[in-house]
Amino acid sequence: MTTQPEQILENNLVKQLQQLGYDQVQLPDEAALLSNLKSQLAKHNNTDFSDTEFKQVLNHLNKGSVFDKAKILRDKMQINKDDGSSEYIEFINQKQWCKNEFQVAQQITMEGEYKNRYDVTLLINGLPLVQVELKRRGLELKEAFNQTNRYQRHSYGSGQALFNYIQLFVISNGVNTKYYANNRKQSFKQTFFWADKENRNITELTKFADAFLDPCHLSKMITKYIVLHESDKILMVLRPYQYYATEAIADRVKKGVKNGYIWHTTGSGKTLTSFKASQIMMELPEVHKVIFVVDRKDLDYQTTKEFNHFSSGSIDGTDNTNKLVKQFTDDTKLIVTTIQKLNTAISKERYTSKMEDLKDKRLIFIFDECHRSQFGDTHLAITNFFNNKQMFGFTGTPIFAENSAKNELGRRTTKDLFDDCLHKYVITDAIKDQNVLKFSIEYVGRYRQKDSMNEIDIDTDVQVEDIDTKELMESDKRLTKVVDYIINNHDRKTHNKSFTGMMCVSSVPVLIKYYDILQQKKEAGEHNLKVATIFSYSANEDDKDANGYFGEFEGAMAAEPKSAYGNLHTREILDKYITDYNTMFGTSYSTKDSQSFYNYYNDIAKKVKSKDIDILLVVNMFLTGFDSKTLNTLYVDKNLKYHGLIQAFSRTNRILDEKKSQGNIVCFRNLKKNTDDAISLFSNKDANEIILLEPYENYIKYFNEALKELQHLAPTVESVDELIDEEAQLQFVKAFRELMRLKNVLGGFADFEFDDLEMSEQDFEDYKSKYLDIHDGTKGEGKEKVSILDDVDFELELIHRDEVNVHYILTLLAKLHQAEGNNAEKQKKVIIDALTSEAQLRSKKELIERFIAENLPLIEDPEDVTEEFEKFIEKEKQLAFQHLVAEEHLKADIAEKVISDYLFTNRKPLQADVIDAFEEKPRLLQRKKLAKRVTDKMVGFVETFISGL
């Protein structure tokens, strides 16, 4: 045999785990699992359990969700003993994590909705806390991920639901091994390789087992480095670089008073790392308080919110300096505050008397984004005020000699302020590990000189720097050209608004110009983008009306050029823009008081994340500290460099899904050198090709090479039908999936055209239909065995690049109603293509085609299309329901209730409920088959007439 079977991989792992200190135990079924749990818990707690006492334990353990069980695991339980006494037992020793009972079992069988056998289970004190699923060498690792998801769905909750105590999953095909927390909401992109301190991934199973599955290390990961996210009720586990950073800080606090800083690239999860570091330091008896310091109120809000996500109520955010001082003097263990308030608390006489008692207390300060320019003064003030402090900084973009700025304290680097760098995880590490996305950077804005410098055309011959004057860069004509480019390309960049964009500009006056141009074009019907803005205004800025002219010079004053708003204060202009926002979203914000403005900021942040805003227009705000996975495009008309550039670009590179293949940066200024310098500084000298997407031509080449692989398997669309066995179909699915991924990247380039490829668009669509047919074929009824295609990742989301829904189709129908001749045929093709490619709409395809043929010609006013379509659907829905009831001989009222319950619970109807709907109960042997058939019809009915409508 040329390849290693899965069983040998499994047996070798179990032998290795025994050598690491696990006791092997045979647990064929749940009865054996429960018996073992009883003896192991008794051993761990140095006690004995009678059957009635152990029943209390089982009743206590069998409560709640995976999240609830994670809390139960970490808590103690009081047991009422048979002799009338009581005692507390623990399920896991969290303080001395090595002092637990470790076992390994193979092929535990559980029967839930289906019978499943689990490969390798690691038990701590008898509870199954880690599940290892293996695939033989050569198979795709994601199959193991999909398998654990299937087990979660089908059998982990069966019986006493002990497998819902799983904290970590490990998946491996021998050569690649990853781990992740027990969280059903995460995708395969949220699985991690373990690594050493130098960020070298440990992928091979035996090496991973030595490093990660060692009993002491594994129990430490479970007890110390899993975070319970209170808001989402999920488990999160730290990645290796987060673990090493936290360990390094804790080690430095235990061993001395030296400072230090962590260099983890922007977007790599510094907040989670700093929370865990804070939490661990809070537990050290020698530490009096931990103070987390940020530099602006918006970051203060975001960090407080995120910390409380991890542990509800863990932080009482400080609203003012009085409250901050109170927190310093009461029993608050963890404080989140801003640099400004902290500086006030230790420098203003009215506060310092209350702070005096803290001077000699052991205080730990953690600074978020410690490169901030304001930090120099505060650093000096803290150093002078507190005698027993220890300071740690987190930054994605440290200050080095190359990017340091001179101020009154002279040039200072991050090392000057914080001593040693305790751990590094730079941007190249994060991209290699797929923890952040690459950037696709386009430089748009070549100009040619006409009769005057103000005549400009995008995509011509002269580089920006040749004519980079303030007058040109801020001219209305140039800004209008930029806006036109954004309007024409925004849908492409954001996959038809599947994502959102942000635009950063050079100044508030330029922002005002941009906003006005965008609004004017929207009112003219040139776009329907939802644009919002926020910027800082100066309370005491120059009054443009205070120009020295008095009454007799009214004429001269009137001749002075004014903006569209006359000489309004920028705060008044912002309030006008906020009024636009209020009109758009039905809100009532303003700048009248700080809280309302603060609420406006928070609402914008939420709406960008929920994709309710298409483009957020800013100068500086939101360019640091703001994380939104749904933001994928940044338009740049601002000179950025070094840490400011990397921070701004990194707003776009948060991992989300396969559709979000890169962060798009569109520069309307020539920032090429600045970009290269920043990347070199914050990674290494040869990092450009790793961070940036390759040129467009390279991806054309990769696509054509992938096409040859596809055509080797299926030379023509028709030949796909000849792939009868599932192994051949699997190879086709993988080959076409790679083609889709490359097309997805190409689609982000503004100059992408199908003509550049060796495959026509029609052929691509035809192959896609075959791909979808194979996917649909895996859902056939009555399968006796599990298909090898069940676990394969079809990546259907790559097909659905547009936000195509019924509303979108109705918009197209209204256009079709008005179209004539060739335009009508083209419009009809767009509709049919959309119906074919969108999974949710494929079930409605026949209905919509019939509506086009029979009803659309009879509608006189295009505005009536939506209403007429709703009438049509309602009528067809009633007819379809009557047909279903008559064909299957169902009781209409009960069938309607079954469908209604399905809509409410989003769970397929139970067999018993479907059987109750029959007019005559089917014979016992027929029930399963008939219930399956009727269930499928009911689900199809909902998909066709209700879902998406």
Image (cartoon, rainbow, N blue to C red):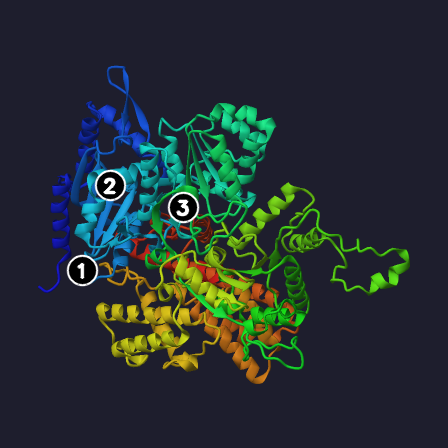
Q: Quadrant of residue 434?
A: bottom left
Residue density around tag 1, few if under 14, some if 14–19, many if 20 or more, within 10 Å:
some
Visible residue check, residue 919? yes
Residue density around tag 3, few if under 14, some if 14–19, many if 20 or more, within 10 Å:
some
**Location of the N terminus (image quadrant):** bottom left
Single out the mark in the foreground, 1 or 2.
2
Residue nearest the observer in this picture, 451 or 614 = 451
Give the vertical position of 429 relative to 367 (above or below): below
Is 539 placed left or right of 875 in the picture? right
Q: Which mark is residue 470?
A: none
- Report x, y in % for residue 57: 27, 28
Residue nearest the observer in this picture, 370 or 767 = 370
- Labelled pair 3, 1 in contact (Cβ < 8 Å): no
* Mark 2 secondary-structure assignment: helix
Give the vertical position of 69 relative to 866 (above or below): above
Instruction: Look at mark 2 in the image and give the residue it sits on.
Output: 218
Residue depicted at 26% across the width and 68% down the height: 730
Instruction: Look at mark 1 in the image and give the residue it sits on.
Output: 137
Badge 1 or badge 2: first in the primary sequence: 1
Give the vertical position of 445 relative to 545 (above or below): below
Amino acid on which disc 1 is placed = Arg
Residue nearest the observer in this picture, 687 or 440 = 687
- Report x, y in % for residue 337: 52, 37
Residue nearest the observer in this picture, 417 or 884 = 417
- Report x, y in % for residue 143: 26, 58
Badge 3 or badge 1: first in the primary sequence: 1
- Report x, y in % for residue 667: 52, 67
Residue depicted at 20% across the width and 58% down the height: 175
